[in-house]
Image (tube, coloured by chain):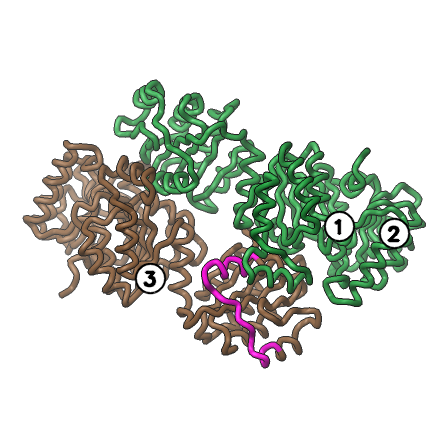
Chain colours: A green, B brown
Amino acid sequence: MPSSLRPFFEATGVAVIGASANPRKLSHGILKNLIEYGYKGGIYPVNPGSEDILGQKCYPDVAAVPNPVDLAVIILPAPATPEALEACGKRGIKAVVIISGGFKETGSGGQELEAQCLKIAADHQMRLIGPNCVGLVNLHNGLNTTFINGLPDVGGIGFLSQSGAVCGGVGDLVQGKKVGFSHFLSLGNEADVTETDIIEYLGDDPNTNVIAAYVEQIRDGRRFLEVAREVSRKKPIVLLKAGRTSAGARAVSSHTGSLAGSYSAYQAAFKQAGVIEVNTVAELFDVSMCLDFQPLPTGKRAVILTNAGGPAALTSDSLSAHGIILEDLEAETREVLRQHLNPAAQVGNPVDMLGGAEPADYAMAVKQLISDKNVDIVIPILVPQSLVNPAGVAQAIVDASQGSTRPVLTCIMGDISVNEARLVLQGNRMPMFVH
Amino acid sequence: MPSSLRPFFEATGVAVIGASANPRKLSHGILKNLIEYGYKGGIYPVNPGSEDILGQKCYPDVAAVPNPVDLAVIILPAPATPEALEACGKRGIKAVVIISGGFKETGSGGQELEAQCLKIAADHQMRLIGPNCVGLVNLHNGLNTTFINGLPDVGGIGFLSQSGAVCGGVGDLVQGKKVGFSHFLSLGNEADVTETDIIEYLGDDPNTNVIAAYVEQIRDGRRFLEVAREVSRKKPIVLLKAGRTSAGARAVSSHTGSLAGSYSAYQAAFKQAGVIEVNTVAELFDVSMCLDFQPLPTGKRAVILTNAGGPAALTSDSLSAHGIILEDLEAETREVLRQHLNPAAQVGNPVDMLGGAEPADYAMAVKQLISDKNVDIVIPILVPQSLVNPAGVAQAIVDASQGSTRPVLTCIMGDISVNEARLVLQGNRMPMFVH
């Protein structure tokens, strides 16, 4: 049986109910995003006051749309939402995203409206995402019902967020860096569709290799455990939990009106379900990108390949703190490195090629190291030197790593000036870290 | 008595011994940097093979320079260095930076050469920085003897590094972000001048507000304790120690040939001396910048001001993990916020102004919060929304914080698209964090 969530991500026609011709309105932004990101299905603005918005014929109500519509996006004042939802139900639409706020999060009046929407949805066997969310994006078909400016690159990370703001902020953070996403969505109040439903859906989605989640609360712990345990056997689930401390939990509760639960209970559940927990937004995507781009290591022996001692020492400290070992290399590897590198280079582990190391040195060394039997993980480090081009080193690492069954995780120090190197690496499915 | 290190940073004339006309040579880069960064003293390339380099008259040896020279930078093959150093001594030069490698770090032959240099320096009462370093920069007078491309902005952080690569990498990392530096140097083998000497010097330097150090080892623990204890009473010392784990210590030892010592002994010493230890390069400058730009908090009660719940929850978690408290605001503050903000806003702590918050809302709220008696630290958070300009919010926060005796630490989510906001904030001595 196909998932009831499928129309949300694979819709053949989308109605935007409340689409506005005013470019200052979020509903205008949604229509614009639907048009601009390559979505090939039908796009139907619904607004009794307009004939045409952004070149799309506009309909007075959803019943008037002549073509198939299987997804509706509602962005109307909260009190007008139930009526629009009812019209969707009558039209036979099975998936509705309610972007609008003004529901449960605002108190008892809103709570009643939300209950009313749920009742209508149940009567018509509709699924709801939201209300009070920024919408969703399927990057593989360009279906974008958000009002977010710009999008991350297309790839294998399916990201779901219980905070619309975190969703938007993440978009800003990863844009233009070749951190590839398959899906990108916020769930708002989760009146119907929950984080667990999306994890289950992405678990079966062929474009998603890794599931990344920002979570403030789990609605149904037992079901989450079941689903996450199942899904994490097939693909990694990386999760950032907000509200871990009592201050954080109070902050969550004040903005969603719901309790965040005890963190130790969450931790136990995550562990049981095979979920990988992280501590920051940056870590959420660093870890997810690694898991998407590179094979899993088969052991915990790493080798550091560097052009500078200091950063290798810092990396050694960090690996050691995480239980990763710097094992001695095979004698043969050391011999080959000794023959080819600067005579003053260190061919232990870390391998320090010294500041003059060129792309050809990186290529030769990476090739040797990925076939050393004492190595499970290869970590090339580059500190930019005035005469070495970071993008050239990045390309050499990419070429030398072709077909490696061991993960190669590159670390280049710097920021704006190493962006080209990042695009070379991450564009070739090799994660780059900056320090 | 003026410090014997003063000529390193306040030289009236600099000789570059081994300056090359070949733009691929590091010694050419040094001369170029000396010329290009606004240094007003005399610049004297020394090279018997050239008449003129980069428009500067070139001298066959240092004795031939007719004008005052109180700093020499030597960049010659190691075996030629003692002779050049002897010539500097005879010329009466009291400060020499030896950039060249090929000394102690390469084994016993190099060790002998290094000892020879030290002996010459002692005979002539010269101070040495290096060998095997990238040189030094005083950003307040443009004296730049490094070959690093580009420089950070001018400001109050004095940075010293025992790794030349970390020095270069940091330059790349902070460039163009208005993280201000007073000094910027690497010490190489520390044959003579050590990390402790520089900390002592920067402790008395009027342009330095905070000392940031990347350290692999302390040469003389007792003296470090004495000096650091004294200096940290006047200005903060923020320190990143590499070689904390045994793997890290081995990595340090393999590239410097010296033992890193037991980390727990270091930790105890740092604590006794009032040194603030950090864990990553990014943290080194985040913390240093905060201490440079903002007043110290007089207590541990923070308030979060946000336009989004999720990031406020993450920040609450992080504050709580560091012992910072989110105290209730004064009744009067809550009343004023309630009157001026969106009626659906939360006026507890975190104060959540919701996604529509504009620069004027931030201005009003920051003004209220910096005068609330229950608040020691103000943390404005912005998640970019499609209709709000981050730089506008940044300017509003800057204006509203004028004259605040409480630290205001802003957090704006995103990356490239929030760079303008960062320049507004950091250009006005307000640190910005990204997530």
Pinpoint residue B417: horizontal percent, then vertical percent: 57, 53
> How many numbered discs?
3
* Res B423 visible: no
Name the amino acid type tagged 1: Lys
Above or below: residue A88 compared with residue B289: above
Residues B351 and A27: in front is B351
Magenta extent: B314-334
- Work out whether disc 3 and disc 2 sit on a shared chain: no
What residue appears at the point 73 percent right and 44 percent down from the top-left corner? A197
Q: Secondary structure at mark 2?
A: loop
Are discs 1 and 3 less than 8 Å apart at CB? Answer: no
Which numbered mark, 3 or 2, is in the foreground of this view? 3
Find out whether the residues at labels 3 and 2 contact each other: C-beta distance under 8 Å: no
Per the rendering, the mark at residue A169 is none
Q: Earlier in the sequence, mark 2 or mark 1?
A: 1
The verdict on a common chain for dots 2 and 1 is yes
What subunit carries mark 1? A
Q: Return the x and y of residue A257 as percentages of the image width and height.
A: 69, 63
In the rendered image, which quarter is residue B163 located in? Answer: top left
Q: Which residue is mark 3?
A: B210
Q: Chain of mark 2?
A: A
| Secondary structure type for disc 3 | strand
Distance from the alpha carbon under mark 1 to that under mark 3 = 49 Å
Q: Amino acid under label 3? A: Val
Same chain under badges 1 and 3? The reply is no
Is residue B44 something that shows in the picture? yes
Q: In the image shown, does A115 or A226 lie closer to the viewer?
A: A226
Q: Which mark is residue A32?
A: 1
Position of residue A298 measured from the top left corner of the image (x, y, whole percent): 49, 27
Check disc 2 and report the residue beneath it: A58
SS at badge 1: helix
